[in-house]
Image: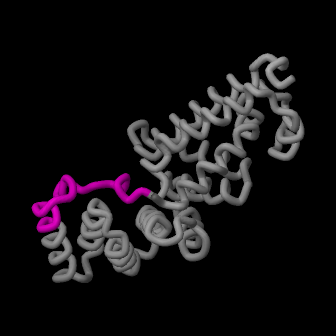
Amino acid sequence: MSMLFVILSLALVAATVAILAYRGPVVAHVTDAATAAEAVTRPTRGMVIGLTVLIVVVTGAGYAWIGSPRLLPVTPDAPPGPGPSAEAQVAEVQSRAEHQPTDANGWIQAARAQAMLNHGQAAVDDFRKAAALRPDDAELLANLADMMAANGTGRLDGEPIQLVDKALAIDPNNVRALALKGSSQMTQRDFRGALANWNQALKVAKPDDPIAQFLRTQLDEMRAAAAQAASAPASDGR
């Protein structure tokens, strides 16, 4: 399991109050995470239960997106899943890319195929070759950053976040780059920055974008769980 997912799960728990302050009236009207945290320095038992629910919500679905190569876009000719036939198909796609080394699309298809079989390093190598041919492709740079994090320490520190920043400089509305930037900001406890980027991702994404669907679902469930906890009777904490 990617450490990026684990780190994000913990960060999302810490950010619950900031999310409420950002979008809802459940907690006092505050505008930053520090003030929000001060407002709940004596949490009720209901809040603790709510945060526990929040952890379950995030860990139940979070790995489907953050750092998971299986959510990378799959081309029609990519293999359906692990197995001898899939391995053969991946080898064929890889061979085509190697025989046409100046075709960026070939390397992208090979990278996606390798990612489908959890061949992380091979996918990184192929994405990197494609990026060398198309250095101004924001989506490609974001895919490379995502795969590098998933295949490495699980964090976006270093080259991955540099690639994300470059992608956003090229296309400020790239959904994957916005989502990755937000998750990186969460690990740095920059909750307002993270929420701003995630909300922007939701604003510009197509309705059926899997990343946007995940973000929307998780933010809604987080707010609901935290709101329920925050509205628990004060006597619970006595």
Residue 100 lies, with reference to residue 17, above or below; the image says below
Left or right of 95? Residue 139 is right
* In the image, residue 220 lies in the stretch drawn in magenta: no
Say which of 195 and 88 sits in front: 88
Is residue 82 inside the magenta stretch? yes
Q: Which residue is drawn at 27% across and 62% down?
A: 117
Toward the viewer: 21 or 102? 21
Q: Quadrant of the C terminus?
A: top right
Q: Is residue 82 left or right of residue 10?
A: left
Q: Where is residue 36 in the image (x, y as percent from the top left)?
A: 83, 39
Q: Is residue 178 rendered to the left or right of residue 41?
A: left
State the count of labels: 0
**Residue 81: image location, x then y, percent:** 21, 55
Please state which of residues 76 and 223 is positioned toward the viewer in this rendering: 223
Instruction: Name the colour scheme.
Output: one colour
Percent from the top left, x then y, of residue 215? Answer: 52, 42
Q: Position of residue 23 (x, y in %)?
A: 71, 32
Image position of 177 with respect to 102: above or below: above
Magenta-colored span:
68-89
Question: Looking at the rendering, which quadrant does residue 38 occupy?
Answer: top right
Q: Which of 208 and 71 is in front in this view?
A: 71
* Residue shown at 57% from the left, 66% from the top: 155
Does 132 sit above or below residue 70?
A: below
Which residue is farthest front? 238
